[in-house]
Image (spheres, grey):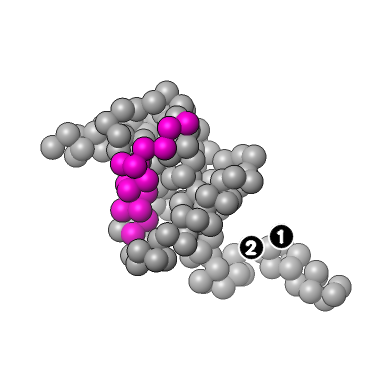
């Protein structure tokens, strides 16, 4: 028992990058999916267009099957239900993603927030909060939002 605790401590607290590649990939997927779920829930009105956008974004970005996507969303919803802070998820992304990959996550968030053709102030707040926690500049945040808006009005 003590040996298992020591291994867990060494693996997750001392050097989290030593975890296996599938574990790292799942952590990135789960963190991203949970943030997308937080955007859907931010305005307290779950719109089917937003939910469908989450599915499309996850499938496209992570090359998942429909079943894999639905399982990931279910797990992300459970994480979101028990989370008290966005930092649990943004920390994983900030530590492991490049600047361009962080921009992609912000783009995904904007696509969800704008999927119902209305940007609620709570959705806007969550996207801005996540961008700040990922150290995405304000100018990049606005540029990405405007690019998403332009593609959604075409």
Residue at figure coordinates x 36%, y 37% from the top left: 47
Inter-mark Cα distance, 2 to 1: 6 Å
Q: Position of residue 54 (x, y in %)?
A: 37, 49
What residue is at 42 percent from the left and 66 percent from the top?
68
Query: Residue 11: image x %, image y %?
Result: 69, 68
Q: Residue furthest top?
A: 121
For the image shown, how many numbered marks are present on the structure?
2
The residue singled out by tag 2 in the image is 16
Q: Which residues are magenta?
A: 44-59
Q: Nearer the viewer, residue 49 or 109?
A: 49
In the rendered structure, does residue 45 fall within the stretch colored magenta? yes
In the image, what residue occupies the spot 31% across and 53% down? 56
In terms of secondary structure, where does tag 1 sit?
A: helix
Q: Which element carries disc 2, helix, strand or loop?
A: helix
| Residue named by callout 1 | 13
Give above or below for 39 relative to 124.
below
Residue 83 appears in the rendering: yes
**Is 75 left, or right, of 66 in this rendering?**
right
Cβ atoms under marks 2 and 1 closer than 8 Å:
yes
Instruction: Name the residue at 53% across, 38% down.
Output: 133
Q: Residues within 10 Å of mark 1 (few under 14, many from 20)?
A: few
Out of 112 and 148, give the one closest to the viewer. 112
On-image quarter of the C terminus: top left
Q: Position of residue 152 (x, y in %)?
A: 21, 37
Foreground residue among 1 and 95? 1
- Check the image and report above or below for 125 versus 135: above
Is disc 2 surrounded by few (<14), some (14 to 19) or many (20+) residues within 10 Å? some
Relative to 20, is 11 on the left or the right?
A: right
- Tell whether 84 sits left or right of 109: right
């Amino acid at each position: 028992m003590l040996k298992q605790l020591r291994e867990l401590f060494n693996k997750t607290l001392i050097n989290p990058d030593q975890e296996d590649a599938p574990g790292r990939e799942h952590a990135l997927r789960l963190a991203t999916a949970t943030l997308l779920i937080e955007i859907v829930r931010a305005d307290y009105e779950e719109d089917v267009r937003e939910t469908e956008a989450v599915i499309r974004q996850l499938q496209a970005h992570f090359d998942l099957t429909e079943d894999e996507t639905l399982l990931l969303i279910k797990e992300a919803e459970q994480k979101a239900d028990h989370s008290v802070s966005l930092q649990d998820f943004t920390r994983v992304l900030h530590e492991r993603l490049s600047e361009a990959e962080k921009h992609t996550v912000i783009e995904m968030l904007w696509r969800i927030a704008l999927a119902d053709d209305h940007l609620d102030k709570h959705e806007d707040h969550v996207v801005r909060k996540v961008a700040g926690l990922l150290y995405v500049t304000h100018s990049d945040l606005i540029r990405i939002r405007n690019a998403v808006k332009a593609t959604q009005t075409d």
